[in-house]
Amino acid sequence: MLRARQAFLSARRATSSVAAAYYPAEPTQPNLVTETIPGPKSVSLNNELGRVFDNRASYFVTDYQNSIGNYISDADGNQMLDVYCQISSIALGYNNPELLKTAASPQMASALVNRPALACFPQKDYAAILEEGILAAAPPGTNKVWTALSGSCANETAFKAAFMYQAAKQRGSQDFTDEDLTSVMLNKAPGAPKRSILSFEKGFHGRLFGSLSTTRSKAIHKLDIPAFDWPVAPFPQLKYPLEEFAAENEAEEKRCLAEFENVVKSQPPHSIAAIIVEPVQSEGGDNHASALFFQGLRDLTLKHDILMIVDEVQTGVGASGKFWAHEHWNLTTPPDMVTFSKKFQAAGFYFSNPELQPSQPYRQFNTWCGDPSKALIAKTIYQEITKHNLVENTAATGNYLYQNLKTLFAKYPNKVFNLRGENFGTFIAWDCENPTQRNELLLKMRAVGVNIGGCGDRSIRLRPTLVFENKHADLLLEALEHSLKDL
Amino acid sequence: MLRARQAFLSARRATSSVAAAYYPAEPTQPNLVTETIPGPKSVSLNNELGRVFDNRASYFVTDYQNSIGNYISDADGNQMLDVYCQISSIALGYNNPELLKTAASPQMASALVNRPALACFPQKDYAAILEEGILAAAPPGTNKVWTALSGSCANETAFKAAFMYQAAKQRGSQDFTDEDLTSVMLNKAPGAPKRSILSFEKGFHGRLFGSLSTTRSKAIHKLDIPAFDWPVAPFPQLKYPLEEFAAENEAEEKRCLAEFENVVKSQPPHSIAAIIVEPVQSEGGDNHASALFFQGLRDLTLKHDILMIVDEVQTGVGASGKFWAHEHWNLTTPPDMVTFSKKFQAAGFYFSNPELQPSQPYRQFNTWCGDPSKALIAKTIYQEITKHNLVENTAATGNYLYQNLKTLFAKYPNKVFNLRGENFGTFIAWDCENPTQRNELLLKMRAVGVNIGGCGDRSIRLRPTLVFENKHADLLLEALEHSLKDL
C-alpha cells in the first residue's frame, strides 16, 4: 500500500528556483513513512494534547523543525507537500533561512523578552521597522498603519476607527455632551450609538464579538453567541466558466449592487459607519466577484458617506499575483482601510486619512498596540518577497497551475466544478459535488502526501507559499489526478 | 539642575538578591543624563514615529536594549527605575538572562518562523510547553487552558465559552433548530441570543467589542463605539484606612451584593451567562474589595446559575503576593474561568469544567489559537518565578514597601490619600487630591528617575517587576518623599 502510494510520485530533479536556493534540502516529492496519516505518533501526541487543550480540529500533530520549504512534516516523519500552509499563513516556506536569521537577531531577542506597550513606550526603532517592512508594503493610497495582534483584532480596530470617525463627522465642532458621557457608561445611545458595520453574505471577518457580527460564513461559527443587529447584503454568486456566463454574472453583480443600495437605504441615515468586504470570500467558499462589482461598491460607499474596509487578512501579501488582491480592481478611489494578518504574522490596518486617527489619544489604544516581534518577521517577509519577485513568480506559477487544472478537470466533469482564480496567482479553488465528496478528496490527497484544505460547504482552496513553483504544481497536479481517478 | 536631581539619590551597595544574580550590572540608582525627560532624542524619534503610527500616548521613546532589570532606558540614555513596567507586564525585569536563553532556543526560532495554526496543526511539543509552563501555573481548581493573544481576546473567548455553555444547558439534548440556523445568520435570536455578561462599575476588561461592552472604567474608553446592552452592578467603594472604616465598608459591600442580586433579578431568567470581575479594578483606579465580598459574589453566581470569570489579566502572575490574586479569597468553589495575559505574555483562560469546551470542534476556534512563542516565554517566566520564590519575595517586598509608604504618607496627609494594597504584594496604590496633582506627581517622579503610572482619575498604581526588592523600594520611597515635598 505504502509502496503503491509512493509509486505514482515520479522522481524529479531540482531546478534553479528561489525555493531551491532557500531550501537546498527541500524534498523533491512527498515522503510517506506510515500507512496512514495521522500516524501512531500523531495519534498518541494528539491524545496527550487533548488532556489540556481543545485538539478536536487537529489534522495531525506537526514536527515543525522537520518541515522544510513547501513540505510540512508530521510527528511520524511524513513529509507532505503543503498547499494549505497554516490556513493561508506561511509566506516563505517552513524554516526559511532569512526568517531564521531574523529570529536569531538581537532585535528579536529584545522584542521577545522586553515586550513593549508600544503606544506608551515605543521602542526607538519601531518607526524604522514599520517603514522598512509593513509600511513599505502599504497598499496604493495608504501611508499609515495601526498594528494589532490578529485578523479579528485588525478588523475590530478598523471598525472602531470607522465608528469614531463617523461620530466625529456628525458631531462637528461640538464636544461630547454630558448625555454622551453618562449614557456610554451604560452602553446606551447617544454615547454608545446604534451605528453598524455592513458585511456580505458568506463573508468571514473573524471570531470576536464585533468581527463575528460581520461574519456570515457558516452558522457553526456564530451559534449561541450574541451579535450586533448589523445589516447584511448579498455577495454575487458567479457561475463558471466565467466566459460562458458573462451576461448572467453581470446581471448577478448588478442585482447585488442594487440590493446593497436598498439595504443601505433601509437603514437609518448615517447609521452604517463602514462596509467590510473580502476581495475573495475565503472561509465562505472562495467566492470571487469582478473588478466592476468592487468599483460599483466603492462608488456606492462614496455616494452614501460610508467607509470601505477591505479585509485582506487572507488575500493579502502576494498569493493573488498582486501584493494586495484589491489591486486587481484598479479602484478610482482607494479603500479607506485595508486590514492584514496571516502571511504577514503582524496584523493591523492601513489607512491614509489622518482623521481615521481619533482626535484624542487613548481612544484607539490597548496595552500592546501590536507586537514588534511580529513586525520584524513581517519586515523580512516583505523584503524577501521584493528581493525575489515572489509576487510575480506566484502570478506565473498560478497561471501555470490554473491552466493545467483546467485541462485536468475537463476529464472529470462530474467530480470537480467551478474552477476559479484565473489570473489570480495561486489563489485557486474549485467545488466538489457535495461536502462528503469534498472531504473524501481532501483525505485522498493527504494519503498521497498533499496537505490541502477546504472552504465553504464543498470547496477546496489552494493556499501554497509564495515559493511554490511549477515543480511543486506538477506534484500537486499528479496527486490530484491520482486522487480524482480514485474518487 | 541635573546635579541637584542626582544629589538626592544616595549611592547604594548591591546586596545579595535575585535581581543582583540576574543583573550584576543593574544600576544602583537612576541615571539621568538629559535635563528633561523626554530628552531630545526621544522627542525627535517620537516625531518620526508620529508620521506612521499614533504616538500621542508616548511617555518617551525607549531603548530596550539598554534597559536592565528594574531599570528602563529611554533613547537618550536616561535609566529610570521602572515601577510601571509596560502597564504591569514585565515579570522578571528587562533583558532577563533566562528569557534571553529561551529567545535564543531552537524551539523559539521554530515558533517564530513556522507560526502554527495550533488547533489544526499543533506542534508536537505544545502539550509539554503548556504542561511545564502555563498549566503548571493553573489556579487552584483549574486544569485546562484555552490560549489566545491578548487580554481582550482572552476575555472574549471566555465569554464565548460561557455563552455556548449556557445555551447548551438550556437546549439540553435538543439539536440546533432550523430557526437557530437561519436566525443566527441574520444576527438575530434565537440563534444569536440576547444573553449577556454582567460587569461592574469601574471595571476594565479590554477594548474589543465584547470586552469593551463589559469595560466601565472611563467614558473615553467607550465613546462612539456601539456596545451590547449588558447589565452592570456596583463595585464596592471602600474607605481607607480599612481598620478605621470596617463597619462602613462591610455595609458598602453588603449593599453592592444586594444590588448585584437586584440587577440579576431585573434581567430575563437565564439571560446572564457570566459575570466578569477583577480581583482589583486596576485601570479603574485600583479599587479593592474584601475576600468576603468576592465569596458573597461567588455564592450568588452559584445560586443564580451564572458563571464567574475572574479577570486576572493585570493582577495575575505574582504581583499580589499570591500567584493569582483571587487566591487571597479562599473561595469555597473556584471561579469557572480565570483569564490572563500581560506578565505571562501568553494570554488565554483557565477552566476545569470540560463542558466549557463546546460540544463540537470549530466553535471555539480561530487561525492561531494562541502563539507558541509566547507560551515558551510564559513557561520560562513560570519556572523562574518558582525557582526563585519570586511570589514570596514580592509579598515580602510589598509589605516592606507598604509599611514605609504608610509612614511616609503620614507626613503628607493633604497630598496623598487612601493608601491601599496592604498584604497584597507590590500591588499598591494611592490617591492624590485631584487629577492635576496626580499628573504632576507622576511627572516629578519621572524627573527624579522613576517611571510610574496612574490609574482611575486621581490614583497612582505601583506595578514593578517580581524582582523588585527592598533596595529598589528604598529608592522609590526616597524619590517619592523628594517629590511630595516639592508638590
Image: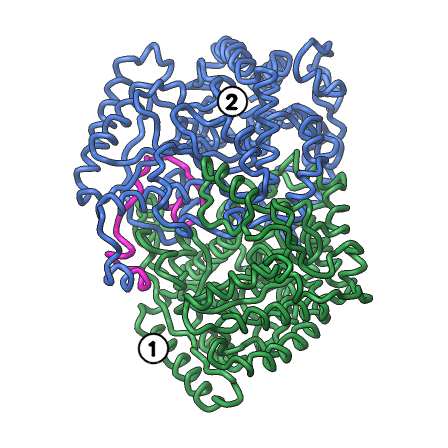
Chain colours: A green, B blue
Where is residue A469? Give x, y as percent.
71, 67
Tags 2 and 1 touching, CB below 8 Å? no
Identify the subunit bearing mark 2: B
Residue at x-position 52% and y-position 70%: A486
Q: Amino acid at mark 2?
A: Gly
Where is residue A408? Give x, y as percent.
59, 79
> Was residue B185 drawn as part of the magenta stretch in this picture?
yes
Q: Amino acid at mark 1?
A: Asn
Question: In the picture shown, does residue B425 fall above or below A104?
Answer: above
Residue at x-position 32% and y-position 50%: B228
Find disc 2 in the rendering and name its residue. B318
Where is residue A163? Give x, y as percent.
43, 58
> Was residue B361 drawn as part of the magenta stretch in this picture?
no
Residue at x-position 57% and y-position 52%: A35
> A339 or B372: nearer the eye?
B372
Where is residue B205? Give x, y as percent.
42, 39
The boundaries of the magenta stretch are B184-213
Decide: few, some or many residues near mark 1? Use Cα within 10 Å; few <14, some 14-19, many ≥20. Answer: few
Find disc 1 in the rendering and name its residue. A262
Does dot 2 land on a helix, a strand or a loop? Answer: loop
Decide: few, some or many residues near mark 2? Use Cα within 10 Å; few <14, some 14-19, many ≥20. Answer: many
Identify the subunit bearing mark 1: A
